[in-house]
Each structure stands twice: as C-alpha cells, then as structure tokens.
C-alpha cells in the first residue's frame, strides 16, 4: 500500500451573518483560494448572547460559517481584507494548522 503523504496548510473558519456571506466569498475568491465549505443556520452563544440557527424564511439573518483550507501565504491576504470589515460588522475568524493529504486540491 502506498504511504499517505500529509502537507501543512492553514484552515480558516469565518463566521458572519448571512447578509455578509457574499463579501466573504468574494474575498476568498480574490485571494485565489481554490474552494470553501458553507455551513448555514448556526446556533450558539457568544458575546451577543444565544443565537438561534434556524429561521424559516430569512437566510440573511442566520449565521454562516465559511471553512477553507489554504497555503500559509494566502492567510495574510484574507486577514488584510477581513479586518476592516470586522471593525464595522459582527463576525469572527479562526485560523488553525492542519495537514492535508491531497495537496493538488489546495494549490495551483
């Protein structure tokens, strides 16, 4: 059996209101990030109290998490773009070290 090779990357998780989702997607695409995963209707408790995830008829009021994995050199562009946004809007960014097995899925 062939050995599985793992490569160091960064996982960036961004949580914003649904109404701000297009800003985040545009930021990732302009930075050259190859893909992302969206998780809608988040529930949880933070500095603004408890947030209910499932609102039947309004996708803009729900919280959305955008998850992406990227090379370390792309993270600074994401942070440069999202910092002014977060100074005026609610949201949070998490960055963590991860290892991926299929490097070609994340780099050009």
Image (spheres, grey):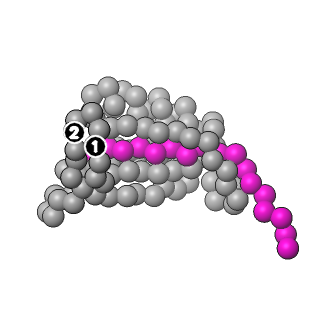
Q: Residue 2 at x, y = what percent?
A: 85, 69
Q: Secondary structure at mark 1?
A: strand
The foreground one among 74 and 32 is: 74
Range drawn in magenta: 1-19
Q: Where is 5 relative to 50, above or below?
A: below
The residue wearing badge 2 is 49
- Relative placement, left or right, of 39 versus 54 is right
Please identify the quarter of the rendering in which residue 34 is found: bottom right
Callout 2 crowding tier (Cα within 10 Å): few <14, some 14–19, many ≥20:
few
Where residue 17 sits: x, y (%)? 27, 46
* Image mark for residue 45: 1
Element assignment for label 2: strand
Outermost residue on the bottom side: it is 1
Left or right of 48 on screen, residue 13: right
Q: Are marks 2 and 1 in contact (CB under 8 Å)?
A: yes
Q: CA distance from mark 2 to mark 1?
A: 5 Å
Can you see residue 108?
no
**At 45% from the left edge and 58% from the top edge, which residue is drawn?**
37
């Amino acid at each position: 059996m062939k050995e599985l090779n793992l490569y160091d990357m960064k996982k960036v998780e961004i949580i914003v209101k649904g109404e701000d989702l297009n800003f985040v997607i545009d930021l990732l695409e302009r930075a050259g990030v190859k893909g992302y995963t969206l998780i809608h209707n988040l529930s949880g408790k933070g500095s603004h109290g408890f947030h209910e995830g499932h609102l039947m008829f309004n996708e803009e009021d729900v919280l959305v998490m955008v998850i992406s994995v990227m090379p370390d050199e792309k993270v600074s562009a994401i942070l440069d773009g999202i910092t002014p946004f977060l100074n005026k809007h609610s949201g949070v960014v998490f960055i963590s070290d991860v290892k991926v097995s299929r490097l070609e899925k994340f780099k050009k």
